[in-house]
Image (cartoon, rainbow, N blue to C red):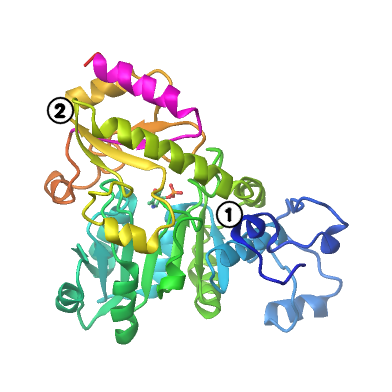
């Protein structure tokens, strides 16, 4: 295995894998097995006791999955990684590992709909409270952090309004207070943003999105310190059981090789479409981290390498106008999810964020006329032409 640290574009292809250990196979093999045989009962005993390295049962670890976990740890510049059956399996394993009854979670104002649902469930069932914060200053955070705050949970850019949180600022204060900072880095991928290098403690991905990149896998990833990852792997992953299948890990290893190439194109296309949308008479507001007039533009410059492939926008009119625009699209597909080769559009108020009560949703800036576009890898001219014809008809 190469051990000299290489550039990101090289690490996505090589890290975590050594062909020498796998019969020279160029591509990581798929270990599609539920269990592993022991040479003797004593060996089984040693493996269970942790006295000997080696695999036992695929819920506790699998060679194909391990390659993915090591690669992601390198890409996020963390110590260790852990793969899950979905982004939500990753989010729930982390939040359950970090909290107990009576604790408090401080969360960015605006999160993925199911993360919101999970926070509500933790409150109702286990008395784990939460508050939402815009996290725009240390003064505000000082006021909002409670003695029982067990973790700070952040999405940035915030889905779908693209507001940003200054990760370095939050991490500095949280580190002083010994509160772990968890970042959902799904929207950026480690190619654009690496929260662990800014002092944050745990990174979560819905690997379903840019990490996979091909719309054919649901998966999640967690990256953090070795000790924390070990704890999650031995408790909330092993005993709740949201593990990834070896085949899905194998597909992710395949998809991830082109992450930088894909991200460059997603970002270039999004930049072009942003310029088009900004001057379109039927589009009111465009939310895009690459907008020089974006209120959080200085934060984007500081912590994001590129502006990403997601754009949200409100159109003039009503909820029905927004839905009509979607119905007129021909190339762009109506679907939730993001980060695929295909350009996707969705209506957060009735789709990804429908579980959030209307009043709370409005406070998060999710209007009925807001649409979110996940810019794909097609020619930007074709995506633009499709949007143009749809807007014309409404
Ligand atoms: C999709 C998504 C999730 C959930 O991931 P799944 O893989 O669908 O379980 C969490 N956070 C963000 C920001 C997402 O976009």
Residue 171 sits in quarter: bottom left
x and y percent of residue 367 in the render?
Answer: 17, 39
Q: Is residue 270 visible?
A: yes
Badge 1: how crowded within 10 Å, few (<14), some, or many (20+)? many
Quarter in which the N terminus is drawn: bottom right
Tell whether circle 1 marks a residue whose Cβ is less than 8 angstroms from ligand 1. Answer: no
x and y percent of residue 284 in the render?
Answer: 17, 33
SS state under label 2: loop
Residue drawn at x 53%, y 73% as measured from the top left: 229
Q: Is residue 84 magenta?
A: no
- Please give left or right for residue 229 compared with residue 172 in the image: right
Residue 304 drawn above or below residue 234: above
x and y percent of residue 245 in the render?
Answer: 62, 51
Quarter in which the C terminus is drawn: top left
Residue occupied by mark 1:
244
Residue 110 drawn above or below residue 302: above
Residue 92 drawn above or below residue 46: above
Residue occupied by mark 2:
316
Residue drawn at x 28%, y 62% as measured from the top left: 165
Q: Are marks 1 and 2 in contact (CB under 8 Å)?
A: no
Badge 2: how crowded within 10 Å, few (<14), some, or many (20+)? some
Front tag of 1 and 2:
2
Residue drawn at x 30%, y 61% as measured from the top left: 299
- Please give left or right for residue 199 compared with residue 276 in the image: right
- Please give left or right for residue 288 compared with residue 223 in the image: left
SS state under label 1: loop
x and y percent of residue 49 in the render?
Answer: 69, 82
Q: Is residue 385 magenta?
A: yes
Q: Is residue 164 visible?
A: no
Residue extent of the magenta highlight = 369-392
């Amino acid at each position: 295995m190469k051990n000299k640290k290489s550039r990101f574009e090289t690490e996505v292809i090589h890290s975590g894998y050594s062909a020498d250990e796998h019969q020279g196979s160029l591509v990581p093999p798929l270990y599609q097995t539920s269990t592993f045989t022991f040479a003797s009962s004593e060996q089984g005993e040693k493996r269970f006791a942790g006295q000997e390295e080696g695999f036992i049962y695929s819920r506790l670890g699998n060679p194909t999955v391990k390659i993915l976990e090591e690669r992601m740890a390198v890409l996020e510049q963390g110590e260790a990684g852990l793969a899950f059956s979905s982004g939500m399996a990753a989010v729930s394993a982390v939040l359950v590992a970090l909290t107990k009854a009576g604790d408090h979670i401080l969360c960015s104002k605006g999160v993925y709909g199911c993360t919101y649902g999970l926070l509500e469930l933790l409150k109702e069932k286990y008395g784990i409270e939460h508050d939402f914060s815009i996290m725009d200053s240390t003064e505000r955070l000082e006021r909002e952090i409670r003695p029982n705050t067990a973790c700070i949970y952040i999405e940035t850019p915030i889905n779908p309004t693209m507001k940003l949180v200054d990760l370095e600022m939050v991490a500095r204060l949280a580190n002083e207070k010994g509160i772990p900072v968890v970042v959902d880095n799904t929207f950026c991928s480690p190619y654009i943003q690496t929260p662990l290098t800014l002092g944050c403690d745990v990174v979560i991905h819905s690997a379903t999105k840019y990490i996979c990149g091909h719309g054919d896998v649901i998966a999640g990833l967690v990256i953090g310190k070795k000790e924390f990852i070990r704890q999650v792997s031995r408790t909330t992953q092993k005993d709740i059981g949201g593990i990834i299948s070896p085949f899905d890990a194998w597909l992710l290893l395949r998809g991830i090789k082109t992450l930088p190439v894909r991200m460059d194109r997603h970002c270039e296309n999004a930049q072009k479409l942003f310029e088009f949308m900004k001057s379109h008479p039927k589009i009111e507001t465009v939310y895009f981290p690459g907008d020089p007039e974006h209120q959080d533009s200085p934060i984007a410059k500081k912590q994001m390498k590129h502006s990403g492939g997601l754009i949200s926008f409100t159109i003039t009119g009503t909820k029905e106008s927004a839905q009509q625009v979607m119905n007129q699209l021909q190339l762009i597909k109506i679907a939730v999810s993001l980060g695929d080769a295909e350009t996707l559009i969705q209506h957060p108020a009735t789709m990804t964020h429908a579980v959030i009560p209307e009043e709370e949703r409005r406070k998060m800036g999710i209007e009925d006329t807001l649409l979110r576009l996940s810019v794909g890898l097609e020619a930007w001219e074709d995506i633009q032409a499709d949007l143009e014809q749809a807007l014309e008809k409404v």
